[in-house]
Image (cartoon, rainbow, N blue to C red):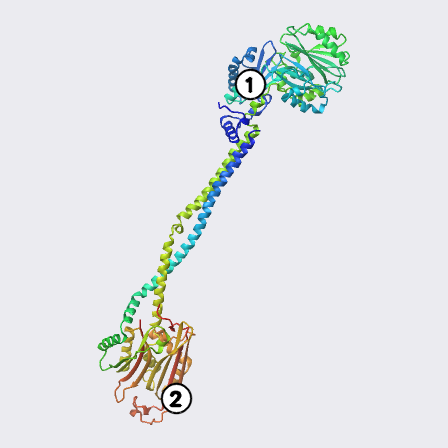
């Protein structure tokens, strides 16, 4: 078993490590029983020590049945050498019974003492504070400061009855059984099996039998005598059934206290009880038959009765009749239907005054382990941390995926030197392209002799009634200052002779549409784009002048020769001007070749 | 409750900080890389555009490269000698009576279309005698063999007499390298 230290001796990181170790190595996070009261557990082992022996019974909540527990005697509870073996036996017994935890409830029935509070504590509203003070700083509230607090344990018992001189008293038990219970808890921790202990004062628990076992007369005060083997407890109740006073009488080796009659009579007198009813509760395995007679001597006019446990609701076959505390401690709270509930018993049950733990786990020991809420937090943190880790891993994966995607992309592997190389290559190609385009431009078929001659043929086909005298073609520059391209002008001047049948042809040539049709046809036939007429950057202007031929002489048809100018009645002069603007595709680059 | 603060600190806060640092670091690296990547993408995009553009130009230019090489070779030769050489070859192809070169006269000065461009050019005057169609064919041959020739002026006159031959006076602008 890991050895854990008190967290106050650890730094924050060590505390966290220890908490994680507790989470890992114990079942505290999974088994709530570690943090529950022994009386709340489903499997309980009740030990009752009354000075004559130890009764051991096991109780299972599921069945509500009692069974015999491991054998134990008084020496086992007091001899440290016997603690480990019995503790291991308890754990094994519980595990064998199929329990996930065991609550060990020790009913201390061999000692009982009261200690009065300081008279200054007279405010019933401060009972809760007094209850805490009795556990953590008993010296501050006790009237007798001579009792050593490390050897005893005190718990508050209130006096709910109106008119009580004190608001409460304290019940005192020694810490005799503390080491025994500590060993049980240690055995549970060693076995990682919750062993939760609880030390009850048997007489306080026995008081809770009164509402169902005792039937006092209406409006009468009464006295209960709880007779144990080593002591007798006297509890005085007023006419409303509320506790006025509780006191104890030690037997000091006798079967009953020698001062019982005196104590009973003087106390009732002090409390101004007149002929109180007296009920005797035998809680010792060896009942004193003379005790009832003693009491009748003291209270001759009173009703004096013994409680018959056999007939009481607390009689259970597996438990001896003198030990009703065991059944009381596991019974549900008594309600009015089951018995006359006074304010006292209602308070004792609801606020659990009768079930106070006199030997709880020492605070220093309890604080070693994380509290229940801390264990839950620690357990929840595992899920939170898992969520954080998953979120972080997902985010990391997403980021890494992005990184890998980037790393695998050609853009990432791209070397910027390659960009420079391509730029240089592109620049070189562009320069080459410009040179090519430049020469393409300069060497374009914008002005060719063979197409010009073909034009003449297309203007005047053979036997069209025309005799050409001169033909001149001239190309002139048409500068466009400031522009990168320069236009030019092409002119054709043709003069000759024409017969009558040629006049329509000349008229056609003289029209824009006519000359354009001829140029377009020529462009199509020669594949020379210089004769295209569908571009707005070009203009085409024809001009034909005809006049009578002064040398014309009428001839007979058989005398007419085509090369004789005098056989043509008309002369003509044709001029065609084709202008290419600077925006024309065939305009000339002004700059030199790059 | 000695453990609550330690549990909260080391169980929640510290893992959150560690996770935050890890995730933040990853995101920092990722975003840093993304920034570099965006820059590289820009370079790469430019590179791709340039590369594709270069391929396009290369394809375009390569188709003309051989032709341009021929042009350049021709342009490096003297125009007159090239002209002479070509005319001799053309003469061999055509009937000698229908195509007769009468003169080749370099003008040694830029003019006409050549005056429009800073590109070096020269003018050359040619004289022919021949039939119309044969001379036209000769022109076709000549201008095909010498694409640098741009017709500047063309005059056609009958040669006189009963001959069907014509006189051709031609002036070319020839681009030079």
Label 1 sits on a secondary structure element that is helix
A554, B130: nearer the viewer: B130
Which of the 4 image quadrants contains residue A260?
top right
Is residue B17 placed above or below A239 in the rendered structure? below
Q: Which mark is residue A546?
A: 2
Is residue A415 placed above or below A355 in the rendered structure? below
Q: Position of residue A549 (x, y in %)?
A: 36, 92
Label 2 sits on a secondary structure element that is strand
How many C-alpha atoms fall within 10 Å of the one at disc 1: few (<14), some, or many (≥20)?
many
Q: Which mark is residue B38?
A: none
Q: Position of residue A298 (x, y in %)?
A: 74, 7
Comes first in the chain, label 2 or label 1: 1
A449, A342: nearer the viewer: A449
Which of the 4 image quadrants contains residue A41?
top right
Quadrant placement of the C terminus of chain A: bottom left
Assess whether mark 1 and mark 2 are in contact (beta carbons under 8 angstroms): no
- Horizontal side of residue A192 vs B104, given as left or right: right
Q: Are marks 2 and 1 on the same chain?
A: yes
- Badge 1 is on which residue? A182
- Is residue A341 visible to us here? no
A163, B81: nearer the viewer: B81
- Is residue A547 visible to us here? yes
- Horizontal side of residue A582 vs A107, given as left or right: left
How many C-alpha atoms fall within 10 Å of the one at disc 2: few (<14), some, or many (≥20)?
some
Tell me how far mark 2 sits from mark 1, CA to CA: 145 Å
Is residue A556 placed above or below A228 in the rendered structure? below
Chain for numbered disc 1: A
Q: Position of residue B99 (x, y in %)?
A: 24, 81
Which of the 4 image quadrants contains residue B164?
bottom left
Camera-side mark, 2 or 1:
1
Chain for numbered disc 2: A
């Amino acid at each position: 078993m890991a050895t854990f230290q008190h967290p106050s001796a650890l730094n924050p990181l060590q505390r966290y490590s220890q908490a994680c170790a507790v989470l890992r190595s114990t079942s505290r996070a999974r088994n709530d029983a570690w943090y529950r009261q022994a009386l709340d557990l489903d499997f309980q082992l009740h030990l009752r020590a009354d000075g004559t022996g130890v009764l051991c019974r096991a109780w299972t909540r599921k069945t509500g049945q009692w069974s015999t527990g491991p054998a134990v005697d008084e020496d086992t509870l007091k001899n440290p050498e016997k603690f480990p073996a019995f503790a291991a036996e308890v754990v094994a017994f519980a595990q064998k019974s199929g329990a996930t935890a065991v609550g060990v409830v020790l009913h201390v029935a061999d000692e009982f003492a009261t200690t009065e509070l300081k008279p200054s504590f007279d405010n019933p509203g401060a009972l809760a504070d007094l209850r805490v003070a009795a556990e953590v700083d008993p010296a501050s509230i006790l009237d007798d400061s001579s009792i050593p607090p490390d050897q005893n344990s005190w718990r508050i018992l209130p006096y709910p009855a109106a008119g009580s001189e004190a608001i409460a008293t304290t019940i005192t038990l020694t810490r005799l059984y503390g080491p025994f219970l500590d060993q049980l808890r240690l055995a549970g921790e060693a076995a990682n099996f919750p062993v939760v202990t609880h030390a009850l004062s048997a007489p306080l628990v026995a008081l809770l039998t009164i509402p169902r076992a005792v039937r006092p007369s209406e409006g009468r005060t009464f006295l209960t005598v709880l007779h144990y083997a080593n002591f007798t407890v006297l509890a005085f109740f007023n006419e409303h059934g509320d506790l006025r006073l509780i006191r104890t009488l030690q037997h000091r080796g006798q079967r009953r206290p020698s001062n019982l009659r005196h104590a009973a009579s003087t106390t009732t007198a002090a409390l101004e009880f007149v002929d109180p009813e007296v009920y005797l509760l035998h809680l010792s395995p060896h009942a004193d038959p003379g005790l009832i007679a003693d009491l009748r001597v003291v209270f001759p006019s009173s009703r004096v009765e013994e409680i018959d446990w056999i007939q009481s609701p607390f009689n259970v076959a597996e438990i001896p009749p003198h030990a009703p505390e065991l059944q009381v401690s596991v019974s549900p709270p008594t309600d009015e239907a089951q018995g006359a509930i006074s304010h006292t018993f209602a308070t004792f049950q609801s606020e659990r005054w009768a079930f106070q733990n006199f030997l709880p786990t020492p605070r220093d020991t309890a604080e070693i382990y994380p509290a229940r809420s801390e264990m839950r937090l620690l357990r929840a943190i595992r899920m939170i941390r898992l969520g954080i880790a998953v979120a972080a891993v997902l985010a990391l994966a997403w980021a890494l995926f992005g990184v890998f995607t980037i790393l695998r992309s050609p853009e990432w592997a791209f070397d910027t030197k390659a960009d420079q190389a391509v730029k240089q290559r592109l620049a070189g190609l562009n320069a080459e392209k410009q040179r090519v385009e430049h020469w393409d431009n300069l060497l374009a078929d914008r002005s060719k002799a063979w197409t010009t001659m073909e034009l003449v043929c297309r203007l005047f086909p053979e036997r069209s009634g025309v005799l050409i005298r001169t033909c001149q073609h001239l190309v002139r520059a048409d500068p466009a200052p400031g522009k990168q391209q320069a236009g030019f002008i092409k002119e054709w001047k043709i003069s000759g002779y024409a017969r009558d049948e040629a006049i329509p042809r000349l008229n056609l040539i003289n029209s824009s549409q006519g000359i354009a049709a001829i140029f377009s046809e020529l462009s199509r036939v020669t594949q020379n784009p210089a004769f295209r007429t569908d571009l707005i950057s070009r203009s085409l202007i024809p001009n034909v002048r005809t006049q009578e031929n002064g040398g014309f002489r009428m001839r007979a048809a058989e005398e007419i020769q085509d090369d004789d100018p005098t056989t043509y009645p008309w002369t003509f002069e044709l001029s065609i001007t084709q202008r290419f603007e600077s925006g024309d595709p065939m305009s000339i680059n002004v700059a030199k070749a790059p | 409750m000695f453990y609550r603060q330690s549990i909260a600190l080391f169980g929640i806060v510290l893992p959150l900080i560690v996770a935050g640092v890890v995730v933040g670091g990853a995101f920092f690296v990722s975003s840093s890389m993304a920034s570099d990547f965006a820059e590289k993408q820009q370079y790469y995009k430019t590179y791709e555009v340039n590369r594709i553009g270069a391929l396009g130009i290369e394809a375009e230019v390569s188709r003309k490269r051989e032709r341009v090489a021929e042009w350049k070779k021709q342009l490096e030769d003297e125009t007159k000698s090239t002209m002479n050489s070509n005319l001799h070859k053309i003469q061999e192809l055509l009937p000698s009576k229908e195509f007769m070169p009468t003169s080749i006269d370099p003008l040694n000065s830029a003019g006409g279309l050549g005056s429009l461009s800073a590109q070096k050019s020269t003018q050359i005057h040619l004289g022919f005698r021949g039939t119309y169609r044969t001379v036209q064919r000769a022109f076709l041959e000549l201008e095909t063999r010498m694409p640098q020739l741009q017709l500047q002026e063309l005059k056609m006159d009958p040669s006189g007499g009963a001959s069907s031959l014509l006189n051709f006076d031609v002036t070319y602008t020839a681009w030079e390298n």
